[in-house]
Amino acid sequence: MPRSLPEQVVVITGASSGIGRETALLLAEQHATVVLAARNTAALDTLYDEVTRLGGTALVCPTDVAEWDQVRRLATTAVRRFGRIDTWVNCAATSLYGPVHRLTSEEITRAIQVILLGQVYGMKAALDQMRAQGQGGIVNVASGLSVQAVPLQAAYVAAKHGVLGFAESLRMELRHEGSPITVSTLLPSSVNTPLFQHARSRLGVLPQPIPPIYQPRVVAEAVRHAIVHPQPRMLVGGGAKLLELVHRAAPRLAGTLLLTVGRVVDKQHSGRPDDGVDNLFAPSVGPGDTDGAFGQRVKSTSLYTTLLEQHPHRLRALAAGATVLAVTALRRRGR
């Protein structure tokens, strides 16, 4: 059984901005202890001040998650200071937009190192410590694009598919062992974070998220729920559920539907000029933000996630009811 949030020691990668930063602030409100990891030290310092002001305990540990030695040092630093790691939250990410033929091999490699290997290294470092202490939980922030690809984000999509696959393999291994260590993977819809301003773009313009778009607090609340109530997979936001439904219902047609009806190519072009500044190879600068530049179009709640995804028994009951209705309808048509 996970410890209560005020008793938790939580490592958060990607804590300098977006979902990671919002998660740290939300946990601070619960007086948790948070270990803050990212490359942007100035943003980590301002976050440290905010966390302590809210009543949490914080430790800053600058980390590039693409480097195994740094991730391992992060785990060691957390344990040396607080004696254990109760939960490890993998939030670090970067993004790379453009048709594959316009991307360099170096850009693709770096994106996959940060997004995929960053979370793989986090899971490995957390696992090593949690096996030694006999308990713990891992929460990965993957993406709705882990289950259905879209164009212009090939490296990101591949990496997020990999995060989900690695996490599910690890979870099955732990279940086979009878281990109390848990692995939860969140699959959010588009989120209004600085990720898009920080992305490297080969589109000729600044990229933008595909609607519907949610505030970072929606995902942070899902992370908090997964810390206390671990579950293998949680879709966050109706947009992620729609992607999954399209993929399941018509896997061969999904791409065509997204390109034509969904117009996913056009919807990723903001029309705003790209300033050429990104965080692919070098960290962002500045004090750090939770929100991105799309606040006028975002949703601040997800009833689907709150009412169904966070209560799997309701999802199972709904699925069973839908099956009964479908079978009944087919039988009536056959008469």
Image (cartoon, rainbow, N blue to C red):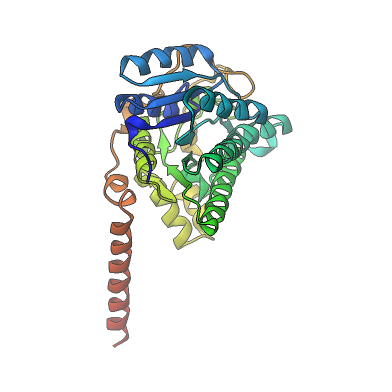
Q: For the view shown, which residue lies furthest in the right direction?
A: 105
Relative image position of residue 117 (x, y in whole percent): 63, 37
| Whether residue 296 can be seen here | yes
- In the rendered image, which quarter is residue 215 located in? top left
> Would you place residue 49 above or below residue 187 in this image?
above
> What is the tally of numbered marks visible in this picture?
0
> Would you place residue 324 above or below residue 24 in this image?
below
Query: Residue at left 30%, top 28%?
Result: 30
Relative image position of residue 178 (x, y in whole percent): 50, 56
131 or 87: which is nearer to us? 131
333 or 36: which is nearer to us? 36
> Would you place residue 286 above or below residue 69 in this image?
above
202 or 160: which is nearer to us? 160
Q: Quadrant of the C terminus?
A: bottom left
Query: Residue at left 41%, top 34%?
Result: 191
Query: Residue at left 34%, top 41%?
Result: 225
> Would you place residue 257 above or below residue 101 in this image?
below
Relative image position of residue 308 (x, y in whole percent): 30, 52
51 or 301: which is nearer to us? 51
| Whether residue 215 can be seen here | no
Relative image position of residue 133 (x, y in whole percent): 51, 39
